[in-house]
Image: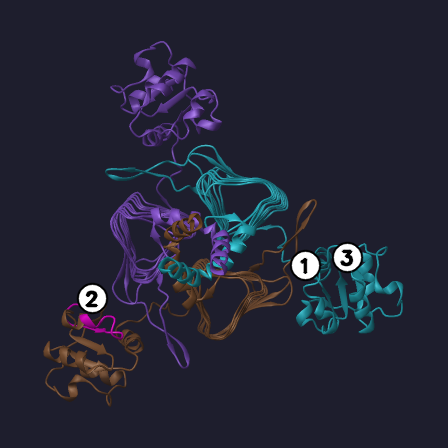
Chain colours: A brown, B cyan, C purple
């Protein structure tokens, strides 16, 4: 589609763009691409100053630019059409949706699915081959259950939620609307509860519940366990990447994000808009305040204040961590200097 | 059920409890709860001094208390019935089982299961929809195979073992009795064995075996590999959490516990009653003695003595780690001080 | 088979072996074993000097030895037949294949598989029970799809590739020939792309592609995501262990190896023959040069030069890391010494 048409569809007409000065330059755009390997006919974006040098090199025909007149001038000189956005990555995300429709099967209940007669199934659902739905399950409208999904008894799944292939939802689980559960994820399995006795580990039955509020996304092969008593809860709009572990009884707030391989031990509490980078671990009963961020591989043992940025294991403020880890490399010379002092 | 009935069922009649002094106070108990969000009619517990302050706040109607007369008095004053236990958490675990029966399907072989005619199937088994059982497999009595489980040829599974949905058991695997394999776990797949050559990696065939002794529990999406030669073995009563990796040829003793996202590299040996907290890693051929504990995120490269508690990466004694990591935060000021000294 | 026959099959006739001096000693070999628990009648190997002491203890009847005359003499004295190899582990890997044939089902399309009529299926394939193959999929010759595999629309899988049970291949994925995808792995699912807005996370559609070149091996429950734009690519002969996460847009070179629980964040680039040990993490846009090695649990935040060996988090040269981490244990005494200095 024409660049002008993209602008119109994205609702950008009033904003600053190259068509306002160069009305004749309105190329056909056939797709979206990353700026460093874009080809002719594609739309790409520059996020802040980091990738700014690509404006002079990219083969893209159209760019989403930040509010930076130098970059706009550069693009114009290279005959690349452009549009300015406050958040170029967000506008690019919206632009992708103009060129791509994710695979979404049409409503159907495949004859090989095994559905207990007591299950309640909503309207316009897709239930793929070999799906298993057990007794007392309630499935909302326009839910999509991809092949080989298994749903244990009494689970509730609300409208428009998508479960990808081979994932498993255990009993005592409630999943909100507009959620996405990716392939191989396991929700609501028994928490890891054992009490030591002289005869070995005694299993504590996990009689609690698991609740995912609306708009939660759970990554591939991620596991979210139910607790012995009470509930494990994932708040509205929280996004969880692949291979994350969320143990029994965790309370995760709204609009949090957890990157891959994060692990939350039992009873961890996360506020709202908490961000945990890859491979972060939070110990038993840890508490993380609203808007806090933990950088990759942090180990959190107690409490993180709202708004804090922490790093390292045990986690300290990111500022202190950066200083201390820079000096870590100098430990050998420090030790040598100290020994010399001691001898002098 | 009445509090007095709970005491009787738990076999606690002879022990110290509030009914011995206040026979009239015998409330109806309808469930179990965590002490900090218990509601009227529920039974909860206090584990040691840590949660002691909750006795004065909780809405629970009944409490399992540690051997602490102050707490007993407090509870009595608040008209909360109580019972004393040496191990309150263990008694609470037993109490949960009075109020909750885990989902356990009745014996049945679902017609959609694909079972090789050479497989031997015990009595009173449950084989769910879309289970696949291949040639030469032996399944014991009262085994429960949830939907979509796949069992490769020649596997043996003993009595009362439960395999949850979507898990996969590979050839050359033997699973004991009273085991639980959680959803998505993969047992007995090929170990990661490749030899570098000028033409690239040469695959070493994995001709060994995987053995899980009785009462082993394996978490969701955990992977336990078989070795090139010899066997991978998980000892009696060992409990493994979600997303753990146990590589080819590991020897794990009895009654160990591994928390989520632990990784054991090839040929690691664990003694009995070893505890590895979340995200611990043990390098190739590492050896950990009986009763040793590694705290979260530890990296173990060699050997840990029996009974030791280790932390950090590379792991050192927990005592040393606590000191050193406290000083880690002071590295910037130490460096400054040293520089000052050097200049003076 | 006779030891002499093994030599012949391995093509070792011309090389240095015990039969050249002791023609009469040619025992029957019935299997392969690790040297420390080998039994009579088995063949084992000694890799370098590390396990050399086992020559004097092992019950193996035959050994593959490194180029070390002392070990050869020892073996001869103990009447153990032997052969010398430049790379004993490689020759042992070849020897295993003489005694073991991995399970490989005969060509068949199981009637319970659900295959879209538009899919193109090659010759001599095995498609196991409950496999699901969706529209437009192309499957090469002699491909093996174990039970309960799910393949989303338009996927291409080339000749001789094996997909183990319960794994999931998403749309927009292309898998080369001679690959092995282990049980529970998920290839080509949506990358973790969300843009923060005042209303919460906005989902960036993942319209890119995932490509696995020939001879790639992907471990159990490993996840490899597709990107928003462009492609995620795993190079020829690269081997990936269990529970690894490879995020959207990563570019992995040829003949790399990643041990279990490694995590690559978005847009990471690995050269050829890179080795990442267990639980290594590489941050967003990280770049690792050809032949570089990161030891277990390293955290890589920027760039690693070709050929470098790095360790720690943040990763530094392995040499520096070994020194610094040895001194880490001395931090308490260093701090004490510094305080004493300051007071003096």
Q: Report the chain holding disc 3.
A: B
Give the labeled residue for mark 3.
B85
Give the Cα distance between marks 3 and 2: 66 Å
Residue A33 horizontal/vertical position (percent): 22, 69
Camera-side residue of C285 and C219 = C285
Vertically, is B24 above or below A22? above
Looking at the image, residue B115 sits to the left or right of residue A136; the answer is: left
Q: Report the chain holding disc 1.
A: B
Looking at the image, residue C37 sits to the left or right of residue C266; the answer is: right
Residue A120 horizontal/vertical position (percent): 55, 70
* Magenta stretch: includes residue A44: yes
Q: Do labels 3 and 2 share a chain?
A: no
* Label 1–label 2 contact, CB within 8 A: no
Q: What element carries label 3?
A: loop
Camera-side residue of B53 and A275 = B53
Which residue is located at x 34 percent, y 53 percent?
A: C316
Give the labeled residue for mark 1.
B101
* Image quarter in which the N terminus of chain A is found: bottom left
Q: What element carries label 2?
A: helix
* Magenta stretch: includes residue C205: no
Q: Do labels 1 and 2 share a chain?
A: no
Displayed quadrant of residue C138: bottom left
Give the labeled residue for mark 2.
A36
Residue C68 horizontal/vertical position (percent): 33, 22
Give the Cα distance between marks 1 and 2: 58 Å
Residue range of the region highlighted in magenta in the rendering: A39-53
**Residue B82 seen in the current view:** yes
| Label 1, residues with CA under 10 Å away: few <14, some 14-19, many ≥20 | few
């Amino acid at each position: 589609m024409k660049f002008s048409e993209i602008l119109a569809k994205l609702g950008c007409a009033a904003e600053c763009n190259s068509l306002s000065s160069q009305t004749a330059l309105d190329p056909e755009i056939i797709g979206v691409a990353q700026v460093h390997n874009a080809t002719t006919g594609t739309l790409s974006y520059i996020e802040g100053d980091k990738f700014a040098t690509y404006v002079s090199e990219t083969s893209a025909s159209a760019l989403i630019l930040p509010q930076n007149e130098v970059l706009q001038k550069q693009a114009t000189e290279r005959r690349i059409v452009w549009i300015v956005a406050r958040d170029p990555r967000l506008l690019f995300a919206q632009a992708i949706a103009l060129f791509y429709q994710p695979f979404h099967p049409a409503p159907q209940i495949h004859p090989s699915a095994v559905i207990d007669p007591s299950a309640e199934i909503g309207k316009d659902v897709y239930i793929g081959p070999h799906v298993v739905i057990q007794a007392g399950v309630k499935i909302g409208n326009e839910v999509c259950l991809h092949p080989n999904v298994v749903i244990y008894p009494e689970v509730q799944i609300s409208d428009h939620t998508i479960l990808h292939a081979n994932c498993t939802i255990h009993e005592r689980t409630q999943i909100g609307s507009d959620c996405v559960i990716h392939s191989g994820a396991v929700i609501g399995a028994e928490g890891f509860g054992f009490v030591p006795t002289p005869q070995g580990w005694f299993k504590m039955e996990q009689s609690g519940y698991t609740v995912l509020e609306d708009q939660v996304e759970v990554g591939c092969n991620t596991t979210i366990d139910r607790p012995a008593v009470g509930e494990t809860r994932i708040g509205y709009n929280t996004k969880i990447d692949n291979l994350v572990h969320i143990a029994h009884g965790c309370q995760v707030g709204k609009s949090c994000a957890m990157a891959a391989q994060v692990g939350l031990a039992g009873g961890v509490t996360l506020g709202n808009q908490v961000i945990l980078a890859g491979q972060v671990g939070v110990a038993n009963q840890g508490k993380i305040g609203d808007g806090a961020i933990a950088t990759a591989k942090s180990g959190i043992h107690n409490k993180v204040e709202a708004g804090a940025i922490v790093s390292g294991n045990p986690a300290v403020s990111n500022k202190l961590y950066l200083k201390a880890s820079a000096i870590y490399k100098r430990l050998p010379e420090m030790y040598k200097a100290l020994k010399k002092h001691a001898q002098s």
